[in-house]
């Protein structure tokens, strides 16, 4: 296909203009923590794996039991208790175990073990919220809780693709499915309560509080020396309840402080968080990149409008003959003749 | 410039056609199960692989294959290559069905299909969502495609008045019909940007929209060539080798641009280092390069290009390369983490096969019964 | 009178334990039950029951036992003697020859000490030394003296001659209540005392010490240990702290009847609340079951029967048997949950999910791929034919 130089140059110029109009667009600024951001601090060194949080979660959110359990597969026991093997459409909160080598001592990476409680991270700049085409997932402007509205959702599952933590779950086994994810017991918080997992936790491993306070608490704990006995708040950071416990020693990291632009669910543990299945993420959310690129291209629909104008003009000029009637009539006649012959 | 189009005629209910009907009926059975028992009943889709064969083939690859209409419109109307005009309508036909069925399979794939209209409600719109743009563009473009294609139907219906009116406004829809695919074919690639680390670094890229757009155009041209050759073999049409060779001539240059951009981006970001470690993604990458390379080499020389057999195989390579690129990016080199697996289930594949069958049946019906293919010239 | 004599002859105590059952008012049936439960308590297979029975019935070689009391409260002896099934429990005293026990000895003063010396001389290297109570290491042990001798002196004198040592109770095992901070007498258990004092068998080989911690030690664990020895003629398997694995191999937490409540997250928050009344887990009230190794949930404690052991009656476990827990941690402090490895019903970090290729799926995919390939090849062939048939036409067109 030969393209004459003039036309080619025109297209190149148009393309460059479009691209440049995107290039000058500034990167979207990172999202800030909402003013009343609440969150959960999960401290794996305090977690005893009792799963009280799982039970509390299911009760508070009226979730059914899940029998697709590892125990069932391993021992052939069936439908005895609620023991899902992962987060799924019936489980929004799950305690998992990491074990290495002989797994003798808790909270050490070698020959040790650790628990990890997985649920929605309530990102400061959530990818799922950016991805959702119909605003079914929204971030509360005050509390920062990432909430789900089934009445808006179309079930496209783009949120599942977008979430770096694989958190949103979908009811693949239902004819009228929903997305299922932790909403930090927003309905209980609305009545002045705290999330069921934090309420149920006997050791303070799941601690509810305002995010800046939780971060401060996390850094206070990082300064503890292994073997010390320290006071740990339980249930609610502002609730005043505490317990004494021996410090097991921390991996020097508060996961979620910077990851993907920060999360409101913070984690700390005695072993590296990577071992506990938390992905190593940069400090910038993918949503920010995606929105920067997309809005760069479509800034105010300027580039597409310009392009459309150019295209319509080009097409108009190049279809001048088509709009003339005679050829059409001729074509019609020819066709008629054809049909007559057919008959 | 104006062509005379004629129905090909001939028997519609051939043996192949009955085979396609059987395939569609099997798909209908699985479709019934999907709507009664849920998506999980017929598919292997999971929380780790929320998008499987349906999205990757029916939507992402299917619409790219259906870019023939778009690609030909760019050539004819933007670059004023009137000589290709006879091929536009045939190309449009595949586009119409490709997009219509992509839209239809969205209803199958989407979990809460009865709320799909929320996409069009402004109060629900999330302008940050790449998905929203894709959804709106694909829907709009499907409508535009039917308008662009409607002369063929109107001619068959002999609705001359409507036809005459349409001719005067068609230019606008053609313009829109070029803009929309430019937007959403690139955005289909942008969909993956937010998936971040789940997409293998050899495919994850900031310029993925451009890469998807270029390959979509090449797949469109490839499909036009492939289809024309198919029609000449199976519908007893004359070979249009010369014209096809000209159309195919643009493909290698587009592909070279694509490869330069893609590999250049990998080098600039340093992700090219991922090639050093052996693994399945690296093999797939090599396979893609092989297909692209074969297509470029065999289409670059005019001597080879005018041979229908060469043209056939290289057009197939172009389409396959683009399809593999999409499958890799969305599915095969997509890794949500350890423990997750995906291979399409039988029901899933049967539904996709059914969609393809319906597409081919509709193509055959329209080609044989309506004036789509240009009369010999 | 004659009749009486007759009956006395009839009930004359034979050499075997089985002959004595009637005199103790023990029916054959309850004796069998006892033997069976002891077999289970020792962790022996059910098939070992006849051997245990034989050991109980036939044993003639009654091992000589010398029972020493150091810093303690005699609670362990009392719990042994005052078990609620005295007829059965007292049998144990018939299984052994208790030559010296400060609590039970009829003799006193020099007479008693003479009996001790005689017994040691008679059974050199063959007797079992049972020690109750801790050893005060401070000031040479002057805080505890029997017959003017400190525990150290007594151990140096007696222990090397013993075949084995049983440290009964937490005091003898690891120091017990006397070792609680500030531990004014620097009380230690027998294993540590032996180590610090360098006490071995007289021939220099290490002296085996079986520890049976508990406050008091469960009498059944002593019975089981002795029976084990009589049945199998060897000492039971011990853990690193000298505890018989059959009794101390598992955490209280592992066999606790309230464990399902722990797993389900149902905790009593305070004494008398709804959860407490419903019998929920006592972890939050400071139960030390999750860090204490003992068989209390299996055989219960205190021997009152009917689910009476501390946790059974609604009080958190105190951890009396566990060094560093009982008398060391505050009663209502939460326990550190110890388990060797995370239990198997915790999912791994990365759970395996279904969704891989099935045979049918692979077959369909293969068929589709194969079909498409065959079709494409066919089309290619046809095209070649068409090309061959009409080369002139193609050429003319291209011009």
Image: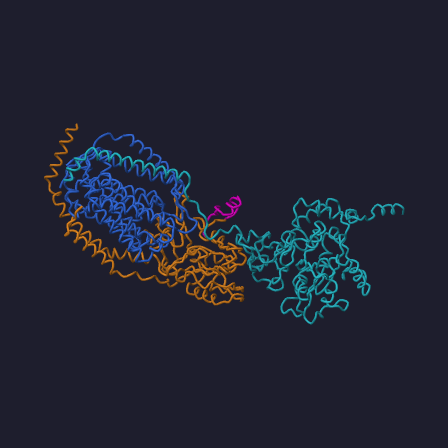
Chain colours: A orange, B blue, C cyan
Query: Horizontal placement of B375 versus A89: left or right?
Result: left
Q: Residue furthest right?
A: C2
Asked whether A80 falls inside the magenta stretch, the response is yes
* Residue C378, position as x, y percentages in the image: 28, 35
Query: Horizontal placement of B171 versus B255: left or right?
Result: left
Q: Quadrant of residue C280?
A: bottom right
The residues colored magenta run A61-82
* Residue A60, position as x, y percentages in the image: 46, 53
Asked whether B277 falls inside the magenta stretch, the response is no
Secondary structure mostly seen in the magenta stretch: loop
The answer to which of B247 and C8 lies nearer the viewer is: B247
Q: Quadrant of residue C97?
A: bottom right
* Residue A322, position as x, y percentages in the image: 13, 42
Query: Horizontal placement of C40 versus A9: left or right?
Result: right
* Residue C389, position as x, y percentages in the image: 20, 32
The C terminus of chain C: image quadrant? top left
The answer to which of B79 and B177 lies nearer the viewer is: B79
The answer, for residue A120, to whether it is visible in the render is yes
Query: Horizontal placement of B180 versus A214: left or right?
Result: left
The answer to which of A302 and C71 lies nearer the viewer is: C71
């Amino acid at each position: 296909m030969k393209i004459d130089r003039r036309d080619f140059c025109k297209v190149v110029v148009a393309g460059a203009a479009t691209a440049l109009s995107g290039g000058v667009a500034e990167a979207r600024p990172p999202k800030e923590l909402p003013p009343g951001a609440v969150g959960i601090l999960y401290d794996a060194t305090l977690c005893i794996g009792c799963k009280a949080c799982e039970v509390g979660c299911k009760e508070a959110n009226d979730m059914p039991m899940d029998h697709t359990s590892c125990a069932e597969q391993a021992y052939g026991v069936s439908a005895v208790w609620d023991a899902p093997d992962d987060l799924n459409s019936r489980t929004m909160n799950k305690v998992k175990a990491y074990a290495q080598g002989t797994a003798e001592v808790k909270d050490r990476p070698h020959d040790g073990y650790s628990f990890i409680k997985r649920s929605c991270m309530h990102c400061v700049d959530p990818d799922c919220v950016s991805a959702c085409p119909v605003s079914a997932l929204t971030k509360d402007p005050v509390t920062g809780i990432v909430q789900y509205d089934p009445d808006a959702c179309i079930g496209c599952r783009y949120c599942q693709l977008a979430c770096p933590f694989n958190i949103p779950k979908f009811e693949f086994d239902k004819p009228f499915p929903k997305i299922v994810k932790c909403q930090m017991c927003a309905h209980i918080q609305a009545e002045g309560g705290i999330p069921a997992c934090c309420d149920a936790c006997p050791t303070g491993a799941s601690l509810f509080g305002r995010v800046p306070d939780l971060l401060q608490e996390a850094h206070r704990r990082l300064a503890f020396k292994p073997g010390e006995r320290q006071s740990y708040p339980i249930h609610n950071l502002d609730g005043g309840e505490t317990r004494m416990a021996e410090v097991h020693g921390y991996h020097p990291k508060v996961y979620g402080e910077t990851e993907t632009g920060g999360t409101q669910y913070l984690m700390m543990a005695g072993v590296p968080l990577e071992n506990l299945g938390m992905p190593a993420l940069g400090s910038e959310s993918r949503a920010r990149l995606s929105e920067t690129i997309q809005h760069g291209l479509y800034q105010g629909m300027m580039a597409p409008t310009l392009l459309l104008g150019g295209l319509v003009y080009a097409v108009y000029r190049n279809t001048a003959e088509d709009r003339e009637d005679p050829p059409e009539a001729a074509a019609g006649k020819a066709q008629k003749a054809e049909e007559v012959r057919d008959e | 410039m104006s062509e005379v189009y004629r129905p090909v005629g001939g028997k519609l209910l051939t043996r192949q056609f009955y085979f396609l009907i059987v395939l569609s009926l099997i798909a209908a059975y699985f479709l019934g199960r999907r709507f009664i028992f849920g998506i999980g009943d017929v598919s292997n889709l999971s929380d780790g692989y929320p998008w499987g064969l349906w999205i990757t083939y029916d939507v992402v690859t299917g619409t790219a294959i259906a870019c023939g209409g778009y690609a030909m419109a760019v050539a004819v109307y933007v670059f004023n290559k009137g000589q290709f005009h006879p091929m536009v309508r045939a190309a449009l036909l595949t586009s119409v069905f490709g997009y219509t069925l992509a839209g239809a399979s969205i209803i199958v794939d989407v979990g809460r299909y009865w709320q799909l209209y929320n996409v069009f409600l402004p109060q629900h719109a999330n302008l940050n969502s790449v998905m929203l743009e894709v959804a709106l563009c694909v829907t709009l473009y499907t409508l535009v495609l039917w308008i662009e294609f409607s002369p063929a139907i109107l001619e068959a219906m002999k609705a001359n008045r409507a036809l005459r009116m349409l001719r005067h406004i068609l230019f606008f829809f053609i313009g829109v019909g070029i803009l929309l695919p430019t937007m959403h074919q690139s955005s289909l690639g942008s969909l993956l940007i937010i998936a971040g680390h789940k997409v293998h670094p050899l495919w994850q890229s900031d310029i993925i929209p451009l890469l998807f757009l270029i390959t979509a155009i090449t797949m469109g041209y490839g499909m036009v060539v492939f289809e024309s050759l198919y029609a000449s073999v199976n519908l007893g049409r004359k070979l249009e080798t010369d014209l096809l060779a000209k159309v195919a001539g643009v493909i290698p240059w587009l592909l070279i641009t694509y490869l330069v951009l893609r590999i250049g981006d990998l080098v600039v970001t340093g992700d090219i280092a991922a090639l050093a470690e052996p693994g399945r993604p690296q093999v797939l990458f090599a396979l893609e390069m092989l297909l692209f390379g074969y297509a470029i080499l065999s289409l670059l020389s005019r001597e080879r290009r005018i041979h229908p057999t060469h043209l056939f195989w290289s057009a197939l390579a172009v389409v396959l390369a683009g399809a593999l690129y999409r499958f890799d990016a969305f599915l095969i080199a997509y890794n949500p983490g350890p423990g997750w697996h995906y291979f399409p289930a039988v029901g899933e594949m049967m539904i996709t096969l059914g969609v393809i069958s319906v597409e081919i049946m509709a193509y055959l019906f329209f080609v044989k019964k309506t004036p789509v293919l240009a009369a010999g010239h | 009178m004659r009749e009486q004599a007759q009956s006395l002859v009839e009930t004359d105590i034979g050499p075997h334990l089985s002959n004595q059952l009637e005199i103790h008012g023990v029916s054959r049936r309850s004796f069998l039950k006892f033997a069976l439960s002891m077999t289970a308590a020792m962790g022996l297979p059910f098939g070992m029951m006849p051997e245990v029975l034989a050991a109980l019935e036939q044993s003639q070689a009654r091992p000589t036992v010398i029972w020493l009391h150091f810093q303690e409260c005699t609670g362990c002896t009392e719990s042994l003697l005052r078990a609620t099934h005295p007829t059965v429990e007292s049998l144990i005293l018939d299984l052994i020859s208790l030559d010296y026990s400060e609590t039970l000895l009829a003799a006193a003063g020099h007479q008693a000490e003479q009996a001790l010396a005689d017994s040691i001389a008679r059974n050199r290297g063959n007797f079992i030394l049972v020690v109750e109570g801790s050893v005060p290491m401070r000031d040479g042990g002057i805080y505890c003296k029997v017959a003017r001798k400190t525990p150290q002196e007594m151990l140096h004198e007696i222990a090397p001659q013993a075949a084995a040592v049983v440290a009964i109770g937490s005091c003898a095992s690891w120091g017990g209540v006397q070792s609680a901070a500030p531990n004014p007498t620097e009380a230690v258990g027998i294993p540590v005392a032996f180590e610090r004092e360098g006490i071995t068998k007289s021939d220099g080989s290490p002296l085996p010490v079986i520890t049976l911690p508990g406050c008091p030690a469960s009498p059944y664990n002593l019975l089981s240990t002795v029976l084990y020895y009589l049945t199998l003629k060897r000492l039971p398997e011990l853990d690193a702290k000298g505890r018989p694995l059959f009794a101390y191999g598992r955490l209280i937490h592992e066999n606790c009847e309230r464990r399902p409540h722990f797993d389900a997250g149902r905790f009593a928050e305070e004494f008398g609340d709804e959860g407490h009344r419903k019998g929920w887990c006592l972890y939050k009230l400071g139960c030390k079951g999750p860090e204490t190794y003992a068989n209390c949930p299996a055989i219960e404690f205190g021997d009152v029967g009917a689910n009476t052991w501390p946790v059974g009656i609604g009080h958190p476990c105190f951890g009396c048997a566990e060094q560093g827990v009982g008398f060391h941690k505050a009663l209502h402090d939460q326990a550190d949950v110890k388990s060797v490895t995370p239990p198997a019903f915790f999912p791994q970090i990365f759970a395996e999910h279904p969704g891989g290729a099935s045979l049918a799926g692979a077959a369909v995919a293969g068929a589709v791929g194969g079909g498409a390939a065959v079709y494409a090849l066919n089309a290619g062939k046809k095209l070649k034919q068409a090309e061959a048939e009409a080369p002139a036409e193609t050429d003319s067109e291209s011009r």
